[in-house]
Amino acid sequence: MNWSKLSNKHIYIFAFYGIFAFTGNAQNSFDEYKKQYPDYNELVLNDIQSYDFTIENNKLKVIQDNQYESMILTENGIQGNKESFSYSELVKLLGYDAYSLVNVGGKEKKIKVTQTNEIQSGQSSVFYDDVKQRQLLFPNLEAGAKKVYNYQVDFLDPFLLHKFIFGGGLPIKNSTLEIKTEKNINIGYKIFNDPSNSIVFSRTEKKGKWIYKWTMKDVKPVKMEGNSPGYLYVIPHINVYIKDYVVNNKKVDVLGDIDKLFAYYKGFTKNLNQTEDPTLKAITLKITENLTNDEDKIKSIFYWVKDNIKYIAFENGYEGFIPREASLICERKFGDCKDMASIITAMAKYANVKNVYIAWIGTREIPYSYEELPTPAVDNHMIAVYKKDKEFIFLDATDKETLYGIPTAFIQGKEAMYNDGETYKIIPVPVVPAEKNEVKEEVKMKIEKDKLLGSGKIEFYGYNRSRLLPRIGDATNKTRFEMIKSLVLKGNNKFNLKDYNEENIKDRDKPYQISYNFDLGNYIVKVDKEMYVNLFLDRPLEKIIIEKDRLAKFEFEHLNYVNSIYELEIPKNCTVKYVPKNYSMDNDYIKADFVYEVKNNKILLHSQLKQKKLLLDKPDFELWNKSIKELKNNYTDTLILLEK
């Protein structure tokens, strides 16, 4: 660690935590921890953050110290010899220290970490994509050894404090956030996911400073569950922000309400695209020249940006907040989400389309609203918004396939704040109804030599279209054949796709369509003269049973509407002995209608299944599972043909 970069005050903080790491848990032996945590390979002894807020040179100074200490409990725990921490252009790393503590002759020996590596962080956020990670490789680990690291960062922007998470994938003995602040600095905070008030809070005064402390003891590891909306919906955490401070008897506002947040954001966009770019203007006029209404123009602009500007997430310092000039984006032919919002709004201006704005928004992984947490933590994305009369069209060009008129799936149900001149407006992003995401299929079948022979046509609308096409991509030949087969698979693993044809791959405004031919063996069951055929060759939602002990909410990517018609030709040597009864379900979660019909020597099943709710909470699980059980019972009902 480069101690020369740190003041004596901050050296003291590190020294204090270093002593704490050596002595704080000395009374608890390795054997005791093994008994307390028999199911875990590692135990976090201390996860501590300490902020120090001061006024220096009439400006806020924010230093954060971090201390982490864990113990290896089993031989398998030795594999967890890597740790990492993050920093960026706006959160400057001042120094760090890392070492292993191993038992040598009954005493702890400190072995310094010498293998480290700096990499680009994999996290995706409009604000923090320039984040770097320092990876640490701890030496000489064994059962009973400890991993210890400390690091210190300088927050260059007091608007951008990080949240503190009380928990993770390992059990934690002590998790603490501490804030020391001069009395002329006023802070606010908001706690999430602590319904039992397990976080212990205290505020004390020491040497003319306020000391705020939040602590959780014996924190259980978080179970990460599939289809969870994200860890911020589950793990207890706290967001701290600076409301205001006083310098030279004058109060300086920082955060605390939406007006202050917008004032901060506005500073990054107020001078955007003030100079006209002849090249981009010419492109805009060319692609809109034969269009007579504003909506057709903005739609053409939206699709042009999708097709011609490659999405690349890259930010450095305040570039994480400031959209680049549209002229530069046009020249480079790439940009991030902010840049795409910038070029869309600039082109709209060239096309004389009014009411197109830049907007800030948080994706669905962020659980906060602007009202409950008016800080930059509420947002991690930027888009453009087009106000058409009283309707809002959300223009997010980062997703190449999402069609005009519906928002990208990952911002459904969220709030957008758009810049309307000198002020702002907050608008809800709708959840796209299931009908717009229809999967429409018609399958015609006949029985020949104990096999089902069939042809089908399936169409994917809305999110189902935009979700599938990027996965298929430009794959050709055998790879594409297998991908298509997985989309149209019917019945069982004896399904044989003979051939297929695709349509509307490039036209976003039309459904992606596959026509195909197949045969299916080992599907028909014969008992004497009776022939059993189940017309449900697809069974939507059948496997989505939610565990009773699930902790997290259950989230779907989008709402679905599956609309299928199965038609079976009755063999000439057969009569119909039994047709399953029609079935209908309509509750808060699912609407289903299964209708059978015998007509013109054919048996038809029209199956319609529509989801109603995007996010299921614990009170929903029981009725949801009951609904799926009902569906499964009806899926298994089988028609019977009788040979003459």
Image (tube, rainbow, N blue to C red):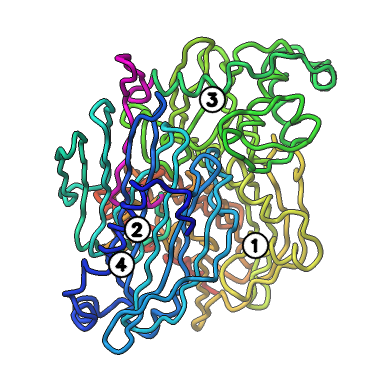
Label 4: which residue? 44
Dot 2: what SS?
A: strand
Question: Magenta stretch: residue 247 in it?
Answer: yes
Q: Return the residue nearer the eye: 15 or 507.
A: 15
Q: Where on the picture, by quarter, is residue 287?
A: top right
- Dot 1 or dot 4: first in sequence order is 4
Using the image, determine if residue 362 lies above or below residue 25. Answer: above
Point out the tag, 2 or 4, that comes first from the N-terminus.
Answer: 4
| Distance between the alpha carbons at the discs numbered 2 and 4 | 11 Å
| CA distance separating discs 1 and 4 | 60 Å
- On screen, residue 288 versus residue 31, left or right, reads right
Q: Which residue is denoted by mark 3 in the rendering? A: 359
Q: Which residue is drawn at 46% across and 50% down?
A: 595
Q: Name the residue under label 2.
A: 67
Closer to the observer: label 4 or label 3?
Answer: 4
Nearest the eye: 280 or 474:
280
The residue range painted magenta reads: 230-258
Residue 135, position in %: x, y? 52, 63
Residue bearing the label numbered 1: 445
Q: Residue at x 68, y 50 (%)?
A: 469
Secondary-structure class at tag 3: strand
- In the image, what residue type sits under mark 3? Ala
Q: How far apart are marks 1 and 3 (CA)?
A: 51 Å
At mark 1, the secondary structure is: strand
* Up-down relation of residue 521 to residue 206 (above or below): below
Mark 2 or 1, which is nearer the eye?
A: 2
Residue 446 at x, y percent in the picture: 65, 65
Q: How crowded is mark 3: few (under 14 residues within 10 Å), some or many (20 or more)?
A: many
Q: Distance between the residues labelled 4 and 3?
A: 41 Å
Q: Nearer the viewer, mark 2 or mark 3?
A: 2
Q: Where is residue 358 in the image (x, y as percent from the top left)?
A: 58, 22
